[in-house]
Image (tube, rainbow, N blue to C red):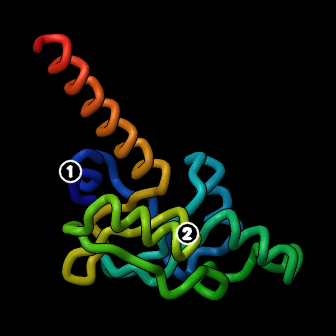
Amino acid sequence: MTVRIFVQDKAHEIVQARRSDPVSRVIALLAERRIGCVPIVEDGQVLGLFSERDVVYGLAREGAGLLERPVGEVMTAPAVTIESHTPVLSALSLMTKRRIRHLPIVEGGRMIGFVSIGDLVKSRIDRIEAEAEAMRSYIQSA
C-alpha cells in the first residue's frame, strides 16, 4: 500500500500558507484548524513547513518579535517530501529516522497531498485489524 491512498481519500483542500504570511497569521491558522503543521507553498511547490515546534523554538529564540516576521524566514526548510508511490511503511520509517511528524506528498515537484504520522499509524492499524479479522474468519470457517 502506498501513500497515494491519502491523496485519494482527502476530498478537502490542503491547508497551506505563503512565505510572506506573518507568523501570527499562520499560528492563528494552526489554532483555528486544530492542526500541528502547515506547508508553506508557492506555485504548487513546497518551500518548507511551519509547525508548533517552529513556534516554540522561535519564541524561545526571539520572543514576541517572531510574531510579525514573515513565516518564510522562520519555517523549517527545505521540507522533507515523499512521492505518491512511496509505500506507507517507507514513509513511517522516514518519519521515524528524521524525527518528523508531517510529510508533503509531491508529484512532479508539486504538492498533491499532505500526511501526518497519525494518518499513517491509523492506516497501518486498520490494515492489521482487517488482516486479523480475515484470519479469524478463515479459522472459524475451516
Q: Is residue 68 above or below residue 4?
A: below
Secondary structure, mark 1, is: helix
Seen in the image, is 140 located left or right of residue 16? left
Seen in the image, is 45 located left or right of residue 94? left
Please state, as top left, top right, bottom left or bottom right, where the N terminus lies in the image: bottom left
Frontmost residue, 82 versus 126: 126
Name the residue type under label 2: Ile
Residue shown at 70% from the left, 68% from the top: 53
Where residue 8 is drawn, which disc sits there?
Answer: 1
Q: Quadrant of residue 20?
A: bottom right
Name the residue type under label 1: Gln
Foreground mark, 2 or 1? 2
The residue where tag 2 is placed is 100
Q: Are marks 2 and 1 in contact (CB under 8 Å)?
A: no
Residue shown at 19% from the left, 82% from the top: 108
Check disc 2: other Cα within 10 Å, few if <14, some if 14-19, many if 20+: few
Q: Position of residue 14 (x, y in %)?
A: 38, 57
Q: Position of residue 44 (x, y in %)?
A: 31, 77
Q: CA distance from mark 2 to mark 1?
A: 23 Å
Seen in the image, is 13 located left or right of residue 85? right
Residue shown at 66% from the left, 83% from the top: 74
Where residue 113 is drawn, which disc sits there?
Answer: none
How many labels sit on residues? 2
Residue shown at 29% from the left, 47% from the top: 10
Seen in the image, is 129 located left or right of residue 116? left
Please state, as top left, top right, bottom left or bottom right, where the C terminus lies in the image: top left
Dot placed on the residue nearer the N-terminal end, 2 or 1: 1
